[in-house]
Image (tube, coloured by chain):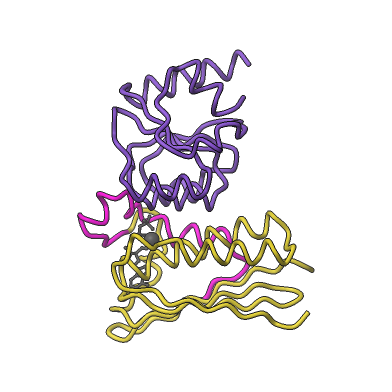
Chain colours: A purple, B yellow
Amino acid sequence: MTIRDIVEKLDLKVYSGEKGLDKIVETAYCSDLLSDVMGNGDENQLWITLQTHKNAMAVAALKDMSGILLVNNHQPNADTLEASNDEDLPVLGSDKPAFELCGLIYQLMQKS
Amino acid sequence: METLKLKYSLKDGDFSNAGNASSNIKKNLKMLGINAAVIKKMVVSIYEAEVNMIAHANGGVIEVFIDEEKIKAILADVGPGIPDIDQAMKKGYTTASEEVRQMGFGAGMGLPNIKKNSDDLKIESVVGEGTTLTITSYYKS
Ligand SMILES: Nc1ncnc2c1ncn2[C@@H]1O[C@H](COP(=O)(O)OP(=O)(O)OP(=O)(O)O)[C@@H](O)[C@H]1O
Ligand SMILES: [Mg+2]
């Protein structure tokens, strides 16, 4: 599955990093603690979080994650968008809360 | 291979640039063709130590030495020091400010992450003087 597949199926907003939409997503990780993601996140994951600042991008890029999905209509900061475009690492968004997004993405992955 | 040396200076509280040094180190390690799994672990360690220098100390200096068998990162700050290193190493222990926690730091997982992802971790700290972390990862045995 790619980021693009998830965007289309769940009707997500794409804020930035469009060039990375064909990145592979093997699984997802949901957390708002950066060190938790540094320790337990992995490459080819979609990171589901409410962290909108540039440090989230730094973590996602260092871990070779596929993209960031912002929950609950949280809006990315301007410097987050800039870093996302530089890294081709998409920042997505939805007005749904984390629990619902995790459930929906889990279902999608079970089917694929 | 000669020893390659990389050096970076970090400013106190400069969260917007946190991770820049780690990212540059990662690029350099990749260019040297070092094993991807080794790079992955080293990047976690250096990032956590980099953020700690920005969040808890007053910035500092990162030096990385790469030779044919190991990567050694020395992260030195002139911050407040760590009074009880055993306590600081415990998962969940943090003195992070409310402001820093709001950003998603302060889980008290940084030092445990470094321990887990390095072959050797040495912490030297003097209260009122500063802290130096030496992180080593061997990529050839
Ligand atoms: N360079 C340092 N100078 C002074 N104190 C430090 C330094 N590094 C760590 N500490 C102390 O050790 C504690 C634990 O550090 P650790 O990295 O494990 O967690 P944290 O930084 O508080 O949270 P997290 O890393 O999960 O965001 C810190 O809260 C701080 O009190
Ligand atoms: Mg830390």
Residue B58 in the image, given as x and y percentages of width and height = 30, 76
- Residue drawn 38% across and 63% down? B17
Q: Is residue B52 left or right of residue A25?
A: left
Which quadrant holds residue A42?
A: top right
- Residue drawn 54% across and 42% down? A65
Q: Is residue A53 left or right of residue A17?
A: left
Which quadrant holds residue B39?
A: bottom right
- Residue drawn 26% across and 56% down? B100
Nearer the observer, A4 or B10: A4
Residue B8 in the image, given as x and y percentages of width and height = 48, 76
| Whether residue B139 is situated above or below residue A63 in the rendered picture | below
Q: Which residues are magenta?
A: B94-122
- Residue drawn 50% across and 15% down? A9
Q: Residue B115 colored magenta? A: yes
Considering the image in quadrants, where does the N terminus of chain B appear? bottom right
Considering the image in quadrants, where does the C terminus of chain B appear? bottom right
Residue B118 in the image, given as x and y percentages of width and height = 59, 64
Q: Is residue B139 left or right of residue B59?
A: right
- Outermost residue on the left side: it is B98
Q: Is residue B79 left or right of residue B65?
A: left
Residue A85 in the image, given as x and y percentages of width and height = 47, 45
Ligand 1: give its quadrant: bottom left
| Whether residue B99 is situated above or below residue A37 in the rendered picture | below
